[in-house]
Amino acid sequence: MRVVGLFFSVFAFCAVAYDFIGVEKTLPKMSPAKYMETYHEYRVNMASGYSAADRSPGAPGYGYSGTIQPYKDTPGLRENREYYNLSAGWFVRDPLPPGSVEARLIAYEDSTGRRKPFPDRLPFLLFTPDAKRGGEPVPLVVFMPGNGELGNDLNRQFRQSLIFERVTSQAFQAKHPCYLLVPSVPPDSPALWEGATDCRPSDIENLLNDTILGVALAQQNPPVDTNRLYATGLSYGGAAVYGFGCSYPGRYAALVPVAACPPGEIAVHPTRPGNWWLFCNEGVELTKKSYMEMVNAFKRRVTLQGGEFRVSTFPEKGHNAWDRAWREEVVWDWMFSKTADGRGANPRPDTSTPFQKGANPRPDTATPSPLSKGGGREADGGLQKAATYTASVKGEDEKTGPERGGDGLMSTAYVSARGLKAGEYWQAEFAGPVAGRISLTLGNSSGAGAPRKAKVEVSAEGKSWTTVLRLDKGSASESFTLTRPARFIRITSTAPANATEVLIVRNLVVE
């Protein structure tokens, strides 16, 4: 099947050297208007050898034409493909014009530093949702693997099987019907957000995006909703996700990098900063000062420009934060609520001209998404926390402290170190008054262990308290409506002195 050039109206990038560190240090002092002026100065006005025409529709990375060709099964691949209902293929990009900038630059270094010809093809795995939807377009999720899964052997992708288990399951597809595309890049490829910081997407980034767009356009049963392209990736693949959002602004509706460091804040587009949710483990990334400085700088710039950047952490020590992240239902609900044009996912999209409407809104018409109102334990130094969480009885260990009950994640919870006595509590103190529907998830992950001797109290100033709910049925899910604004929400034990009922708070959500 021939894949024609894909049409995107995108921001022009330029290959220009500049003092990245020097510029980055000045940015926090700039107003949004000044930042936009600086961004344009470095990425447009100082163009050198890489003109706006190279970023036009049909240019490499922006829908350069190619073909979809079959992939020959390797030992074990057929069994894995059939288990997850996947197809496999190659995207083979058409030859680039001999005199083009890309044709002169395309080459990369292997691990020994030797210059190698750059490939013109990438292999991929693809899950196709049920076509019985009356032709209604569905989203496409791009999963970018880590270093351990790179190369032409697609069977290596199943080293990280959880995302396949999750996204291809009947339950997931019933709620969020979508394609899942898993492209693979050559080993020893350069970092996949280099283009975000040197003003020019790298050759591997362009080929990768040509592959994504080419495969997306080729799907017609059902068609791909080009207003709802999503990306997630782990480690090396998480860096690729940053590249997607920064080097091709406005193309992806939501981006979920996991265990990956962002580029500098100069990479953030002034009018299309994106919707982001970063996940990492506290025992690894959060112990590195340089990592947190880059995360906080990037987050600050995204939010100042009107985008959304959430940070959620797990109390683990290893690098693997992705298995937990992808198990969180709230992550996928958040992702699928986003659209590239910022208008929300409920209205049926206009797909009369694929890859023209919605996928990359023009800078003067794009509607930025609202800022996050929570969604996880915020990294230190970022925006002010939505709430502070305390308890009369400490958690069992560092993984079960009071803050775990309000981090927005179902895989973490506050677990009291002992049974609470009457009057002892777990409490959320919000930065400002909140009102509306409040939902609580209590007990362990199986739904057992919810309190039977407790009550929920609220207060405006932390002194006088009003009981709004009795917790005496052992229900794992409870909710109530605040008719008057309150800053404090407290779960208080009503147990006798010899109580042994441990309090487990998994989540509190202000809807």
Image (spheres, rainbow, N blue to C red):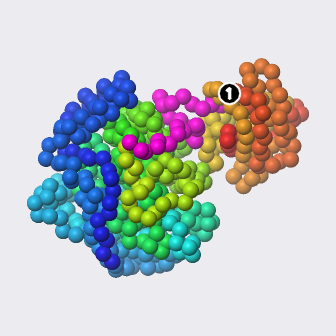
Taking 2 as reference, is 208 above or below it?
A: above
Residue projecting furthest to the right: 496
Residue projecting furthest to the left: 99
Which residue is found at the position 62% from the left and 66% from the top?
174
Residue 125 is inside the magenta segment: no
Quadrant position of residue 404: top right
Query: Tag 1's secondary structure?
Result: strand
Q: Nearer the viewer, residue 75 or 409?
A: 409
Quadrant position of residue 92: bottom left
Residue 91: percent from the left, percent from the top?
A: 31, 70
The answer to whether any part of residue 415 appears in the image is: no
Which residue is found at the position 23% from the left and 67% from the top?
120
Residue behind mark 1: 433
Could you classify mark 1 by the number of other residues whose Cα lies within 10 Å: few (under 14), some (14-19), or many (20 or more)? Answer: some
Residue 261: percent from the left, percent from the top?
A: 38, 43
Residue 366 is inside the magenta segment: yes
Mark 1 belongs to which amino acid? Answer: Pro
Residue 142 in the figure: left or right of residue 205: right
Which residue is found at the position 32% from the left and 36% from the top?
266
Q: Nearer the viewer, residue 147 or 170?
A: 170
Q: Nearer the viewer, residue 479 or 162?
A: 479
The answer to whether any part of residue 270 appears in the image is: yes
Which residue is found at the position 36% from the left and 38% from the top?
270
The prevailing secondary structure element of the residues shown in magenta is: loop
> Which part of the image, by quadrant, shows the N terminus?
bottom left
Q: Nearer the viewer, residue 443 or 44?
A: 44
Residue 101: percent from the left, percent from the top?
A: 14, 55
Residue 212 in the figure: left or right of residue 329: left
Q: Which residues are magenta?
A: 364-392
Taking 156 as reference, is 404 above or below it?
A: above
Taking 152 as reference, is 236 above or below it?
A: above
> Which part of the image, by quadrant, shows the C terminus?
top right
